[in-house]
Every structure is written in C-alpha cells, then in structure tokens.
Image: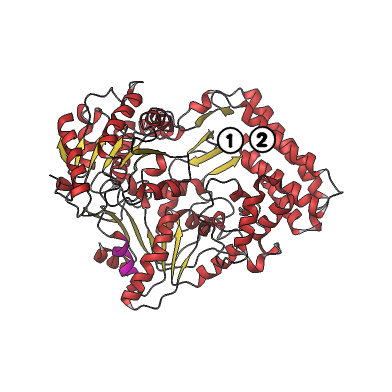
Amino acid sequence: MAQAVAQAMGDHARLVVEAGTGVGKTFAYLVPALLSGQRVLICTATKALQDQLHGRDLPQLLRALALPQRTALLKGRASYLCRQRLQLARQALATAHAAQLADIQLWAQGTQTGDLAELPGLDERSPVLALVTSTHDNCLGQGCPHFADCHVYQARRQALAADVLVINHHLFFADLAVRESGVARLLPDTGVVVFDEAHQLAETASQFLGQQLGTGQLHDLAQDLLAVGLRHAPALADWPAHGERLRQAARQWRLLAPEQAAAAPPGRLPWAGVAPAGWDATSWAGATAGAVLALRSCLAALDAVAHLAPDLAHLHQRTVDLLAHLARFSAPPDAGCVRWLDMAGQLRLREVPLDVGPALRALWQGLPAEPGAWDEPARPPAAPARGWVFTSATLGDDERLRWFTAACGIDEARVLRVDSPFDYAHQAALYVPRQLPEATDPAHSEQLAHWVADAALRLGGRTLVLTTSLRALQELAGVLGRRLAPGCGVELLVQGQAPKRRIMERFRAPPHATGYVLLGSASFWEGFDVPGSALQLLVIDRLPFPSPGDPLVQAHGARLKQQGRSAFRDYALPAAAVALKQGAGRLIRSEDDRGVLVVADQRLLRMGYGKRLLRALPAMRRLESEAEFAAALAALTRTSTTGSPWP
C-alpha cells in the first residue's frame, strides 16, 4: 500500500485503497506523504481520528524519520470556544446553565487552543455547546471585538502555515464553498490530499452541494436577536417580541408535523408536490407564511439599527439569508435533486443532489465545476496538480470497488485492495441463530434480547450489540435492562443514555468485577475500536439494508429503474454488504483478539443474495448449532481467565 501511495503521489494520480483491518493503513499513507517533500492535507471523517493522527501518529513518525515538518490540526468552528458567544451567554441567558458556563469561563482563561475536547466533563450533547460556539450564520468575522484572539481564526492561521494539515471531510468541502465567495480561504493548496475513512465522502459532499433550513436556525436567531438587540439598541425595538414571533413560527411548524413523520425511517418525510408527504398543503403554506412574516418583522426592526454595531449588521444579513432559503423551499426542487423533511431532533428542510459524481469528478481533475454545482456564487476553482488518495477498510464488495468509485466520480482511479493480515479462520467464528424468529417478525427484537442476555451472562459481558434502527435499539434496551439486573455481574450500556465518549471508555476499561453489554446503533457501526478481551461477542440484529422508507433510498431506486437497472441488486445489496462489513470489523482489532460474530438474520443463509453478503465478510469458521456456539463462548471464557488457546 505504501508503495502504491508513493507512486500515486509522484504521478499526481488518483488512488483508491481498501485496506483491511490491521493493515496499518495510517502509516502506509503517512510515511510516503511525509517523505514526498510536498505539502500534505489529510482528511478524516471523525474528530477521534483527527486527534489520533495529530496527537500520536504524526509526532511518532516525524521523530522516527527525523523530519522537521510543521503539523497543524483544524476542526470545524463548532469544536472551538467563541469568546463573543460565551460573553453574550453569560450576560443574557437564564441561570439554567450558569454553573456550566462558569466552568467554561474558568477554562477559557487558560486554554491555548480553545478546543472544547479539552473539557473532559463536557457532554457532547449539552445544549451549552450551541451557546458558546459560533456558526457560519452568527460569526461576526473581523467585526468581532474578540477577533484578534479568536480560537477559530488562530487555528486557521496555523493551518495555512503547516506542512501537514489534518482536517475532516466537512471542512474540506466547506473550504471549496467559500473559495470564491469573498471569504478568506480556510485551507492551503497542497500537492497531496489523503481521504481516510473515505467511505463517507459522497454523503458529506452531498450536504455541501445541497440546501437545508431548520427550525433551530429560527431559534438561534431569536436568541441572538434578544441578546444583541438589548445590548446595542435596547430602546429602539421590542426585541423580546420579535424573538417570540420567531420561536412561535418554529413551534407552529413543529406542532403541525404529521404523526407518521416520527415513524418515517430514519425520521425523514418524503416531499411530494408543494408540501412534504402526508402534510396538508394549506397547513404547510400557513406555517411557511408565519415564518416569513416573523422574519420580515425582524428585518424591518434591524433595518433601522444595523448601522449601529457589527453584531446588528450581521443579524440583518442572517435574516435576509433565512428569507432567501424560505423562498427556495417554497419553489420546486432543482432537477436531479431529492427533497425531504427531516424530523430527527429539530425540523429541517433538506434538498440534496442524487448524484454528486460529476461535481466531484471535476474537482479531482482540477477543473472548475459546472455552474450551479456548488452554492452560488461559489464554485471550486481550478486546482493545481495533486495526488489524491482515498482509503478505508470498507469501500465496496467487488474488485473495482464501484460502490465507492462511481458515487465519487473516480471510476478511472487506480484501485488496490489489501486484505487484513489477521487469521480470521482461527481468531473468529460466525454464527446465525436458527431458533430466533425471522428478522421481519415483530417478536424478533424481544426474543433476540433474551438470547443476548443469556449469552452475555455466560460470557461475563464483553458483548456489543449493533442495531439497524433506533426502534430496535429501544426494544432491545427494554428487555436487556430487565434481564441484566443490578448484581448479576453484567451492566448494560445504551447509546444515548450517556455521552458516547464516556460509554466507550467504560466499555474499553480493563477487566474487573463488572462486565458490559453495549447496545448501539448507527454511530457505533464504525470508528469504534476495542482491541483485547473487552469485546468478544458482536451481535448484529438484522442485515443492514437501507430503509425502504427513506426518501433518498426511494429516489435512488426510482432513478435506477428508469435506467433499466435493479434498485435492489445495484443499490440496496451493495450498500448492505458495505455496512455489514463495516459493522463486523468492530470484532477483531489485533492479532491477539478472539471472538464470535452473530448475525441474527436467517436471510443471510436462506436467501440467494446471502452468498454475496457472506463474501463481504472475512473468512471466519462457521458455527452450525447452538451447542457449537455455547462451546465457543465457553472457550472464550477459558481464554480470558486462564490464557488457554481458543480452538
């Protein structure tokens, strides 16, 4: 892999590498990148990998290679403390968050980076984060009184001076979106770009090529309107009343959401005609009109005071932008785009292109994208010759990795597949329980939960259960919570009941009197690394096919049918193969790991397409009966307690 990466960098070519677990892909691209003598940009999908690369891997390699390169880490603005927002929050907000704000204020006096990851006690789900960080909408830029010591801009200045810069996929596309919009660039030009965790690339690109508008933006504007208005122009407008109108408009939209929206997997309601599906067109028009009236009322008040302070001028521009977004969503969607209403958390209006391949192809080739491909007036400019490397443990289930390359517009790229060095036939086993109900049976989750409880109690915990939906997670959590009662020696950890970082740390902790069963959904299927004996039983509740109720899935299927192709064979099946491979990769993370993968879905063995899904998994030995499974658990228990070999 390192040789292929070095060759691609030297040729300014595009290389796609699927590197199995344990290959050491991080060093395989870092070493040739550091030795290339070129400026290097490394893009990851997660903050955890960003921190690992910058804090551990790069310093280790630079010391070993005796190289003097300057490195920098750059995250999105939501990761950094905003001094201006913290000041406004402490001045204007209720006492509900006073203690947390005081802790952040104390930390702010000593931090050098402003990276909120330095605060170990801060829950990543805390509403305080939105109060002390900036967004593209509410950042004052050079008009901010704290601009000289702004953590975001300090990080960006360091990034522009670095020889090796570590960012994430979102920042890469955000930089493209602002290059020609009059905003200072975020990233330097580099000769080498590496995308790690590249399987998420097309999805991230679609977010920046699309449009969205959420009720959270109305709430944020209302909050800032009150704080800034009372500070700079307290007697010139009824700021509390304007803020309340915005909150009422957001509330009206939320209350009108049809009941079926909550059940629309995954919380997405298709958009049909002039309104989302299942939503009365008159009610939709009324909610939209209410938001427009509230925003116009705010705009009229801001017209008279915008000249008084940069904060007020910025609020004026934000209001104008929100009105423009509302106008866009009141018109039909662009050709080739799919639109839906996202009901997860806040209400969001979303529109994304079905195919991002053409825009990305132009980017990789160093050409300007076609007009309209990126948010106007910004389009990615012509780029210098670069070497592009795309890598992940899971990029497809065929030799050419078409699931990834077609979606990302790199069909002509060099492709390399490097198998894992692990001895899966000896280290792992696969079991499909035949006694459980069919995966489509309503009783499946309950029966699976009892089966998992029995297995985990025998094993002493050390179990990760991955579900394909939040509904299944909740059903399993209910039964497992009753079965794994206090004092049984096994504790249940459930996604969402505590910060993800804290859950992962507890599960990875060295063996002690209490074992753990971790129950997680989407975010635990990847980027969760548990080497050693803390994880020895991995259970996947169902085959991870895309949800047929998802508007994106429906739109992709409809497009394939128009082309005379099969939506199942050409879209759903390869997507399921990649997801299954990604989830199964959580089990074996080192040469010493041992474990059993359970796929609790008999379709894997019974249906013809199961052979394709089985080929996507590592070549594990198969357990054919419950007795063989019980023997494997007993062997794992002996291995963990006595160090005896596992058969």
Q: Is residue 29 left or right of residue 293?
A: left
Q: CA distance from mark 1 to mark 2?
A: 9 Å
User: Would you say residue 566 is visible in this rendering?
Assistant: no
Q: In the rendered picture of this protein, how many numbered marks are placed on residues?
A: 2
Instruction: Tell me the amino acid under the disc marked 1.
Output: Leu
User: Would you say residue 423 is visible in this rendering?
Assistant: yes
The one of 39 and 531 positioned closer to us in this rendering: 531
Q: Quadrant of the N terminus?
A: bottom left
Scheme of image coloration: secondary structure
Residue at numbered disc 2: 250
Please give the label number shown on residue 347. Answer: 1
Say whether marks 1 and 2 touch (CB < 8 Å). Answer: yes
- Span shown in magenta: 26-34
The one of 490 and 467 positioned closer to us in this rendering: 490
Measured as percent of width and height from the top left, residue 71 is found at 44, 70
Q: Is residue 440 left or right of residue 623?
A: right
